């Protein structure tokens, strides 16, 4: 099955949700929206898992990756709540994701630990480690205006409620 189909199979409800759609209004890195970044991280996480022939929970991987930056605000806007964004946003994302979706232990760990080593507690699961790595790779690519998915996320990024 194509990676885009995997993202839709396990993440359609997240991708079409009001909160996730609002991420299209916020820039993450460079000119990349938080929505496109999250889809890119999910895409790259699945690609890495397949490339490395890892046995894992693909559903949890996709859902956790899509929700890893579900903090739902523009962190570039000066606001006391946004202070120390890099250290705090994983907790905000996890709280919002718990509110809007039913999460398992692996998804929660993906969201809470994706900022390792900035946040010192390491990821616990292989899915969490993949998302943590994919997040860093995508962030670098986005700052360099490079699509690390080879256009693989365009369809998912065009979905609307």
Image (cartoon, rainbow, N blue to C red):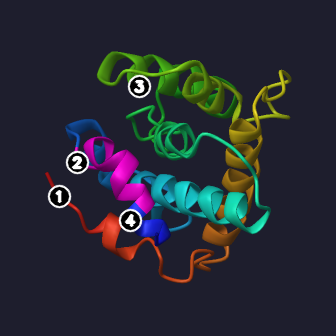
Spatial separation of the CA atoms under disc 2 and disc 3: 14 Å
Spatial separation of the CA atoms under disc 2 and disc 1: 6 Å
Spatial separation of the CA atoms under disc 1 and disc 3: 19 Å
Residue at 57% from the left image edge and 23% from the top image edge: 108
Q: Please name which of the two marks, 1 or 4, marks the residue nearer to the observer.
A: 4
Q: Which of marks 2 and 3 is nearer the N terminus?
A: 2
Identify the image quadrant of residue 61: top right
Q: Which of marks 1 and 4 is nearer the N terminus?
A: 4
Secondary structure under the numbered disc 3 in the rendered image: helix
Residue span colored magenta: 6-16
From this view, report whether residue 48 is shown above or below residue 18. below
Q: Please name which of the two marks, 4 or 3, marks the residue nearer to the observer.
A: 4
From this view, report whether residue 25 is shown above or below residue 14. below
Which residue bears the numbered disc 1?
160
Label 2 Cα neighbours within 10 Å, binned few <14 / some 14-19 / many ≥20: some
Which residue bears the numbered disc 2?
16
């Amino acid at each position: 099955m194509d990676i885009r189909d995997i993202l839709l199979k396990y993440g359609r409800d997240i991708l079409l949700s009001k909160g996730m759609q609002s991420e299209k209004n916020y820039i993450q890195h460079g000119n990349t929206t938080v929505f496109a970044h999250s889809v890119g991280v999910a895409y790259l996480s699945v690609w890495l898992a397949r490339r490395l022939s890892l046995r894992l929970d693909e559903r949890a991987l996709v859902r956790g990756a899509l929700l890893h930056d579900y903090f739902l605000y523009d962190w570039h806007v000066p606001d006391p709540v946004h202070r120390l964004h890099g250290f705090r946003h994983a907790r905000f994302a996890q709280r919002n994701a718990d509110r809007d979706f039913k999460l398992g232990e692996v998804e929660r760990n993906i969201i809470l630990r994706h900022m390792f080593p900035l946040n010192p507690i390491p990821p616990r699961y292989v899915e969490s480690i993949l998302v943590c790595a994919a997040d860093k790779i995508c962030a670098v690519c986005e700052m360099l205006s490079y699509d690390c998915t080879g256009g693989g996320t365009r369809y998912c990024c065009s979905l609307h409620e």
